[in-house]
Amino acid sequence: MKTSIVLATYNGEKYLIEQLNSFLSQTILPDELVISDDNSNDSTDFILDDFIKNAPFKVIKVKNPDKGYNSNFENGFKYVTGDIIFISDQDDVWKENKIEVVLNYFRNNSKCHVLIHDLEYCDEKLNSIKQTKIQRIKSFNPSLEGYVTGMATAMSKKFLDICLPLPKFINYDIWIHYLANYLKVKFVCCESLAFYRRHQSNATIEGSLNVSKKTKGFDYLKSNFFSSAIPTLEYQTSMLNSVKNKFVIYLDSPIESLFNFRDRIQESEYKLDMIKKRIEIINKPPFLRFFRVAYFFFQGNYSVFSGYRSAL
């Protein structure tokens, strides 16, 4: 399998060299590195050009014609030629066996088209806080279906082609994993294969999952308990409509048998119906909500979401 890395950069001079060096330290080197730069105005360009001179693999460097990290990654995706595509941020560091472990997953699992691995939280100086992302997620939710981190993701070229073009209203990595969950082609590797640096300039939203200190499940519940679920459900409605429209395009195509789009469309329509019913419940006065939630729960409809947690 030919491997490609897509690296998105923007004013990354502070940490970029460490990430580039981690590519060189891999037990299996990549075949191709595609770098899309979001018009940096620091020394990023010079660092990249110096790296390219001596790189032992093919490197393509392009400028993002648009602005923002979503369009920056999409721009990089357009140039890849590998069978397996690795996504990389500019400020993390890969462990030496990352490409080797991920390739073995794809080789040994024919149904795997998207793989996400565990990662180790670190501070700005790359000191581990002794907690991985999967450990953090499992402290409040046994399911890893919603585990999304772009820099820990690899995917097949066939799957990437389905993802493009990226929707404008959603982060690129959420879109990739949302599609993968619906197509039932997402696998999770519980081995930590990268150091995930948290610092003041991270592009990712800090939130309850990405803070730089060690957390417990209570921290997640505390930060989310009083938030409104209505925007989340409406957002999911938009997402599912986008998914359905995307799948319709590939009906009767050569890859229909590979991803089974017809069944996935039916599932998305059912979940859309459940989401609309949840929105109706939440829009009711509080004193009416309890009985409607209980009825919805005992019908088994919360199994489409996070079970009793969604009901609560």
Image (cartoon, helix red, strand yellow):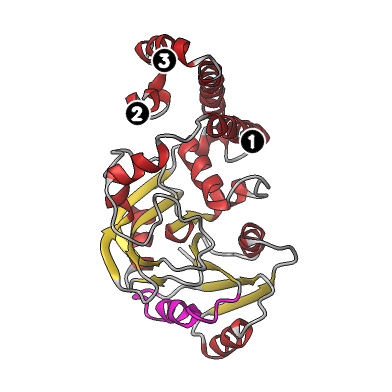
Q: Left or right: where does residue 4 sit relative to residue 130? A: right
Does 308 sit left or right of 224 as displayed? left
Counting residues from the start of the chain, the first of labels 2 and 3 encountered is 3
Question: Which region of the structure is painted magenta?
Answer: 11-28
Q: For mark 3, what is the residue?
A: 293
User: Percent x, y for residue 115?
Assistant: 41, 52
Q: Say above or below: 255 vs 97.
A: above
Which element type, helix, strand or loop, lies under badge 1?
helix
Q: How far apart are marks 1 and 2 (CA)?
A: 26 Å
Give coordinates of residue 231: x percent, y percent. 57, 33
Q: In this view, does 162 lie above or below 69?
A: above
In the picture of the structure, the residue carrying the numbered disc 2 is: 309
Amino acid carrying label 2: it is: Arg
79 to 162, vertically: above or below = below
| Residue 246 shows in this picture | yes
Q: How crowded is mark 1: few (under 14 residues within 10 Å), some or many (20 or more)?
A: some
- Residue 242 - label: 1
Of label 3 and label 1, which has the lower sequence position? Answer: 1
Q: Where is residue 173 in the image (x, y as percent from the top left)?
A: 53, 51
Q: Which residue is drawn at 59% across and 36% down?
A: 239
